[in-house]
Image (tube, rainbow, N blue to C red):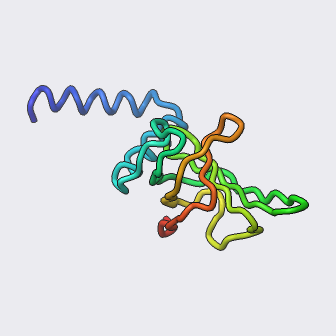
């Protein structure tokens, strides 16, 4: 093993030992997102059509008088994007902890990144 490779290996080991659980999770999610060809949510801007790969953190049904909504926060290790399905109360497979790829046009609502009625693909459960 070359000296440079040893330095890199030692540096990675040290980073893993000193990183918090959240930092390690974020690194994993960024790697998985890149492998899936996703755009990092942290660099996405309003109006872009994006494909974001990540893990659902929360899923909430919001009953409204005119139009119920199902909202889920998708985290890819760089930022959170809220997925909003209008007129839906439940979608099979949309649950916290589930990996998925969401595609759609990015909007901003209350300073939060949002994709309305995204096209999505569920990743197989681990």
Q: Residue lying at the far front in this picture: please name it.
A: 47
> Front-most of 90 and 97?
90
Name the residue located 10 percent from the left edge and 36 percent from the top edge. 1
> Front-most of 105 and 40?
105
Q: To which quarter of the image does residue 86 belong?
A: bottom right
- Percent x, y for residue 106? 55, 47
> Front-most of 2 and 94?
94
> Front-most of 105 and 60?
105
Name the residue located 47 percent from the left edge and 30 percent from the top edge. 19
Name the residue located 49 percent from the left edge and 36 percent from the top edge. 42
Q: To which quarter of the image does residue 36 belong?
A: bottom left
- Percent x, y for residue 72? 66, 54
Q: Residue lying at the far left in this picture: please name it.
A: 2
Q: Is residue 90 left or right of residue 116?
A: right
Name the residue located 16 percent from the left edge and 32 percent from the top edge. 5
- Percent x, y for residue 63? 86, 60
- Percent x, y for residue 105? 53, 52
Q: Residue lying at the far right in this picture: please name it.
A: 65
Q: Residue lying at the far bottom in this picture: please name it.
A: 92
């Amino acid at each position: 093993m070359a000296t440079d490779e040893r330095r890199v290996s030692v540096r990675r080991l040290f980073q893993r030992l000193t990183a918090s659980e959240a930092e390690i999770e974020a690194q994993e999610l960024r790697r998985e997102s890149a492998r899936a060809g996703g755009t990092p949510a942290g660099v996405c801007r309003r109006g872009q059509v994006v494909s974001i790969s990540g893990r659902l953190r929360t899923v909430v049904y919001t009953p409204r008088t005119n139009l119920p909504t199902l909202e889920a926060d998708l985290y890819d290790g760089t930022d959170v994007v809220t997925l909003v399905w209008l007129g839906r109360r439940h979608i099979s497979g949309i649950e916290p902890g589930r990996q998925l790829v969401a595609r759609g046009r990015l909007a901003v609502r209350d300073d939060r990144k949002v994709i309305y009625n995204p096209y999505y693909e569920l990743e197989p459960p681990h």
